């Protein structure tokens, strides 16, 4: 339901305006001054403002200006005014208003304008919600429902700069599910997808801090970022993740490492790097070493 803030100093006119607007199915919140309107505007999710210009203290134009400063997103403002001179209309529109209704108020005119502004406000809100959903979808891996490579790249750049600036630790773990190609080839891609979902869920559940990140890096590979954790703490987390995948106990009779799903982990630290690319290369080299050493283990880039 569209919420309209009605600002009118006359009690009778305020009540009448609220009734007119409520009769078309809109909710109203009323204020008798610009100061009260600004307070209510910041406390409630207002979709539309119907504003008397001739308010005591802060007039309608100044109230509108201040509202525009408070909120960056657009919302419609309809002025109520006894004057309809060109100069007055121009001043009001330049102050941030969108429409005028002359006093004495014609019920049908006010309702029509409020309906029109309400439709625009509703479309704006729906568009904002759709954009937010698209932004979320663009950052989440569709299969595993954890952050995707794009999100990982953004977070890595941010965390790496933070670590360099503050001279703090940042650990990167690259995690590869062992022998996943023969798993997919023999159990089928649907089973393979289910396994990746289970692995992602388990990895995410083992990261206890809200700013630690687990992302799908690509294929059967995952990446974990651990900011502000020293070497000992990073190794502790890596061992916990390795164990967590083992305890899923997902059968894999085509693995030459184990009879169930396992993973290999390569670890690198930001302190010894001069770029995020170098950090990734170091972790990738450590991952290669873990695979060469027999898989189902972790290696640290030295």
Image (cartoon, rainbow, N blue to C red):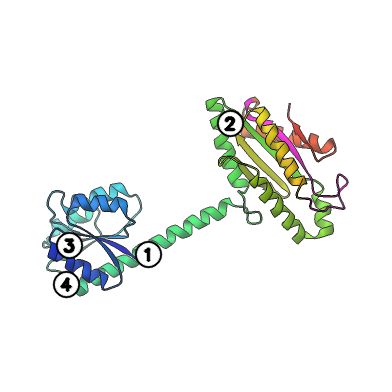
Above or below for 163 versus 115: above
Residue 282 is left or right of residue 2, and the answer is: right
Mark 1 lies on residue: 122
Above or below for 257 versus 293: below
In the rendered structure, which disc, 4 or 3, sits on the residue that comes first in sequence?
3
Going 84% across and 36% down the picture, which residue do you hit? 292
Residue 193 is left or right of residue 210, and the answer is: right
Which image quarter is the C terminus in?
Answer: top right
Q: Distance from label 4 to label 1 (Cα)?
A: 24 Å
Question: SS class of the residue under badge 2?
Answer: loop
What residue span does the magenta drawing correspond to?
249-271
Residue 288 at x, y = what percent? 78, 37
In the rendered structure, which disc, 4 or 2, sits on the residue that comes first in sequence?
4
Question: SS class of the residue under badge 4?
Answer: loop
Going 67% across and 42% down the picture, which residue do you hit? 223
In the rendered structure, which disc, 2 or 1, sits on the residue that comes first in sequence?
1
Mark 4 lies on residue: 106
Q: Are the two marked residues, 3 and 2, in contact with CB atoms closer than 8 angstroms? A: no
Q: Are the two marked residues, 3 and 1, in contact with CB atoms closer than 8 angstroms? A: no
In the rendered structure, which disc, 4 or 1, sits on the residue that comes first in sequence?
4
Q: Nearer the viewer, mark 3 or mark 2?
A: 2
Instruction: Point out which mark residue 80 bears.
Output: 3
Instruction: Point out which mark residue 228 bears.
Output: 2
In the rendered structure, which disc, 3 or 1, sits on the residue that comes first in sequence?
3
């Amino acid at each position: 339901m569209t919420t309209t803030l009605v600002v009118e100093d006359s009690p009778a006119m305020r009540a009448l305006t609220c009734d007119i607007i409520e009769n078309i199915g809109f909710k109203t919140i009323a204020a008798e001054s610009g100061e009260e309107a600004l307070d209510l505007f910041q406390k409630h999710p207002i979709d539309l403002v119907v504003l008397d210009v001739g308010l005591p203290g802060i007039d309608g134009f100044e109230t509108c200006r201040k509202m525009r400063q408070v909120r960056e997103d657009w919302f419609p403002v309809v002025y109520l005014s006894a004057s309809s001179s060109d100069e007055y209309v121009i001043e009001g529109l330049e102050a941030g208003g969108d429409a005028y209704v002359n006093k004495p108020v014609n019920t049908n005119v006010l309702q029509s304008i409020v309906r029109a502004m309400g439709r625009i406000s509703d479309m704006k809100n729906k568009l904002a919600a759709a954009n937010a959903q698209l932004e979320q979808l663009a950052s989440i891996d569709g299969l595993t429902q954890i952050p995707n490579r794009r999100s990982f790249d953004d977070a890595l750049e941010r965390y790496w700069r933070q670590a360099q600036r503050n001279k703090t630790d940042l650990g990167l773990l690259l995690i590869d599910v062992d022998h996943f190609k023969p798993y997919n080839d023999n159990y089928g891609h649907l089973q393979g997808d289910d396994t990746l979902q289970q692995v992602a869920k388990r990895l995410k559940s083992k990261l206890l801090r809200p700013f630690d990140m687990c992302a799908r890096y690509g294929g059967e590979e995952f990446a974990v970022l651990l900011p502000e954790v020293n070497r000992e703490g990073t190794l502790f987390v890596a061992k916990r993740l390795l164990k967590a995948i083992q305890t899923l106990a997902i059968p894999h009779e085509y693995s030459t490492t184990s009879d169930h799903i396992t993973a290999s982990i390569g670890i690198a630290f930001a302190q010894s790097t001069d770029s995020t690319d170098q950090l990734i290369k170091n972790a990738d080299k450590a991952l290669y070493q873990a695979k060469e050493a027999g898989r189902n283990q972790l290696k640290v880039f030295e």
